Image (spheres, helix red, strand yellow):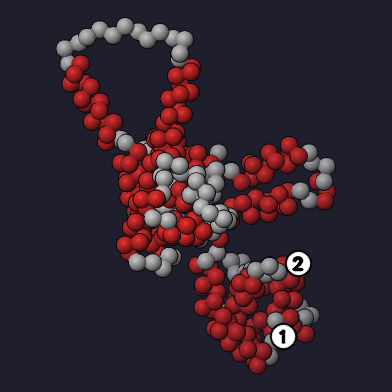
Amino acid sequence: MAKVTKFCSLLHSTCGLKEAFEGQYGANRSIPSAVSTRWNSTLRLVEAVTDLDPQSLNTLLEAQGHKGLCLSAREWSQLKELVEILAPFLQATDLTQGEKVVTKCGFALRSLTQQPPQQMDVSDSAQPAGDLPFGDMVYMMSALLDPSFCFFWLEQDVLAPDEVKSEVKEMIMDLVLAEARKVTILAESSSGEDNKDEEPPAKTPRLFTGYRKKSKKKDDHVSSVKAELIRYIQVCSGEEDEADCLVFWKRNAKVFPRLYLVAMRVLAVPATSAPVERVFSHGGLIMRPHRARLSARTLSSLIFLKCNHSVA
């Protein structure tokens, strides 16, 4: 392992070795760097090295003056065996990494399934769930309104009977509908305050006034929040590629106008902690020692632009 990590370090820091490596294996071939806090990155490094031809690699190292890094046949077979043993764990790590797993809904799901439906007040979507951390129901709604997760996490990752899953789905949908009613009331109250000084124009009765009212009610029923929610779930089920949450709602704001307002309110709480952790990583990369005089406002603006460049 020491030889492999040393070889990778030299490959990424020495121009001569890098040029010789690209000349031997091609410019498109590379060895990934290892991250000290990610064990799977080290395994990927070893896997990439063992995919190379051992004789040509040893010849390359000898020609570049790194004979001490050459691997013997025994060391090569040991690395191969290590990769084969840890391959299932690598796959499990990739499947459960933060970007693909709802990291906070487990607590809320536990409290939701323990509380009978008739005792749950869905009108209060922000009710606390006991003393459990992250037990607020907003985490359940944020997972539903994130197209990367929707109900996939509940169907695939939760070990529970299908009846329980169906019941939980209905509960979460009721929470979203209750939140939609809140958003509608807030929007109507704010618009009413803006227009309270304006007198409504006088309406002239027309021949087909009653017919138009019925048609309007029918259209409102079709474009209701529940209909939008059902259609949204169908769209997420048909998505082949994982969609970015903010990009998805920006693109479909007119397709789901009422649900869009709920999403913009609920998604202030992300369904997974991976984006939040990535913000701190970007901050560390931007606030380097030679840029230590950046003001807090400038640093905040740079991080915001870096993290949201895809939705600009």
Instruction: State the mark number for residue 10.
Output: none
Percent of width and height locating residue 62: 74, 83
The residue identified by callout 2 is: 13
Quadrant for residue 29, please give it. Answer: bottom right
Residue drawn at (46%, 44%), measured in percent from left and top? 125
Q: Is residue 26 visible?
A: no
Quadrant the N terminus occupies = bottom right
Q: CA distance from mark 1 to mark 2?
A: 18 Å
215 vs 13, left or right, is left
Percent of width and height locating residue 135: 53, 54
Question: Is 60 located above or below residue 113 in the figure?
Answer: below
The amino acid type found where label 1 is placed reads: Cys
Question: Is 60 located above or below residue 172 in the figure?
Answer: below
Quadrant for residue 277, please give it. Answer: bottom right
55 vs 117, left or right, is right
224 vs 103, left or right, is left
Closer to us: 163 or 36: 163
Question: Is 291 located above or below residue 166 in the figure?
Answer: above
The residue identified by callout 1 is: 70
Tell me the SS state at disc 2: helix
Quadrant the C terminus occupies = top right
Residue drawn at (31%, 6%), measured in percent from left and top? 202
The amino acid type found where label 2 is placed reads: Ser
Tell me the SS state at disc 1: loop
Q: Residues within 10 Å of mark 1 (few under 14, many from 20)?
A: many
